[in-house]
Amino acid sequence: TQAETSSDLETWFLRGDAVELGIVPAKNTDVILAESVVARCLWESHWREEWCALYKSRIEFYAPFSKKPTQVLLLDDVQSVRSLTPSDRLHPLPGVSLLVVETAWRCTYLAFADDACRNAFSERIKAALFHSLGEGRIQDDVYQAHLWQGFSAQSLVASGRGKWAPISSSSKRKQRIILNGRRMGFDVDSFDAGSSATATATDEGVEVRGAIENEERFVEGLLMKACSFSVESLEKNPKDFVDFLDATCRLRSLSLADLDLASKQTYCLVLNIYHCLLQHALLLSIGGPPDKKTVGHFKRCSCYEIGGDVFSLAELECCIIRGRMSAPVNARSPYVDAPKSSAGYRFYALRTVDPRINFVLNQGDTSSLPTVPVLNPEVMEAQLNAATSAFLSRQVTVDVSKRVIIVPKICDVYRKDFGEGDPYDCVSFCLQYLDEATQEKIIELFTDETNAPSIRYRSSSDHFQSNLQLML
């Protein structure tokens, strides 16, 4: 039948050489150790046939009819080479053989015509790697610096260009930066109901390994792992961060359709993902933490792929976590609203409407707490109360002599979360989470009905954290 008949194009797929792909490689004196026609994965559903050439120090990939390589992998950066055989359900190209070339910040997936071609090319790469080790790689301190630059630079280029539409930010179209793109979805463990969880604390930190009981426990462990990092620790031990990057890739397999948007479990899961993404983005922020000029792009472009969709910090906060709450009023740094084009994300809006979220959701600036809670549905209420109290104790001040109460700026930006927008409604809400001494001062000011106190909003902070820590 027609369905069983192969076309001439199919018989030539992954066959031939550079000439048959119309490729004229860049001239150089290096000897080609091995070559092959491969299909390189740009994203799960998009593979491009290319010519791949292995040299003594690098691997080059050429698109058809090109003269310059579209991608170059330095052998100094290659950490491992492995064969991959996904399940039939997940295999992106059934019938071909897959090879994975891993660097610390990115896995490159190659498809070969058959196992023999794949295995032969894999052995040539491993031989070249062994030879380069014998000659000695770059010095450890230089390599660590190079590795860190790779993490930071990759956060820009691993942005799913072509897969996801650009996002609108400050009247410009900006490319999304996908931070959990080291592995493709067919190369991660899916979430299977009934499997056992291992998100455990150790003397060295928090391990995220093995099978996972459920998505909530996994994300809790992921946030704990994220908050164990600082810029300094990444430079000293980047391998732990590579394990973390691989763990974040599992979010791609999370089923959005199965989430109960009204449940405590989903509420905790989404807030924990938001804080994990914020920490991840801060750690890899090019040129240091964002500032008031760059925070808009930072929050609108820093993204995770989750369950077949993509979510930025701004979309998670404004469309999902705050999706059924009030809109911001005159939002300025560090408060960033999602673009109007992201309105469709409100389909995932959480059903919970809780003003405490204003004080629990970290904005990344120095007026926010330097710590974040790992929310668990069993103790969520106590955690929200504790985080709210901790934030307000830093942000609310009372001057009895001047009859002035100063409240956080976020109470102005999201004023209608506390009633009709009256500042006294905000003070009334905050009162229950303040310490006893501050409560007595505020109550004293309100006892004089003829001379109401003045409510002022604290100025926004223009400085941002370099990383977050866990709230104990």
Image: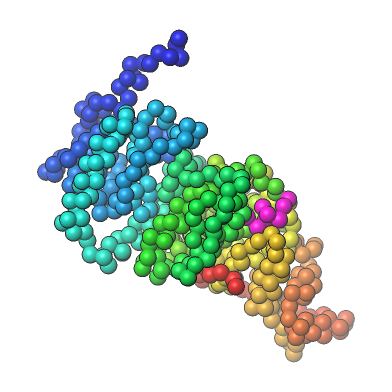
Q: Is residue 25 left or right of residue 231?
A: left
Q: Is residue 288 visible?
A: yes
Q: Residue furthest left?
A: 29
Q: Name the chief secondary structure element in magenta.
A: helix
Compared to residue 392, the image places residue 378 above or below, namely above
Compared to residue 182, the image places residue 359 above or below, namely below
Residue occupying image coordinates x 37% and y 65%: 237
Asked where in the image residue 333 lies, by quadrant, the reply is bottom right
Q: Residue furthest right?
A: 449
Q: Position of residue 211 (x, y in %)?
A: 53, 50
Residue 207 or residue 186, whichever sits in front? 207
Q: Is residue 394 left or right of residue 179?
A: right
Asked where in the image residue 417 lies, by quadrant, the reply is bottom right
Residue occupying image coordinates x 73% and y 50%: 262
Residue occupying image coordinates x 17% and y 47%: 56
Compared to residue 200, the image places residue 13 above or below, namely above
Position of the N terminus by quadrant: top left
Q: Position of residue 463 (x, y in %)?
A: 51, 71
Position of the C terminus by quadrant: bottom right
Asked where in the image residue 284 lies, by quadrant, the reply is bottom left
Q: Is residue 105 left or right of residue 319?
A: left
Query: Is residue 266 inside the magenta stretch?
Result: yes
Q: Residue furthest bottom?
A: 401
Q: Is residue 40 visible?
A: no
Count up the numbered dots. Answer: 0
Q: Is residue 314 left or right of residue 73?
A: right
Q: Which residues are magenta?
A: 262-269
Query: Is residue 123 inside the magenta stretch?
Result: no
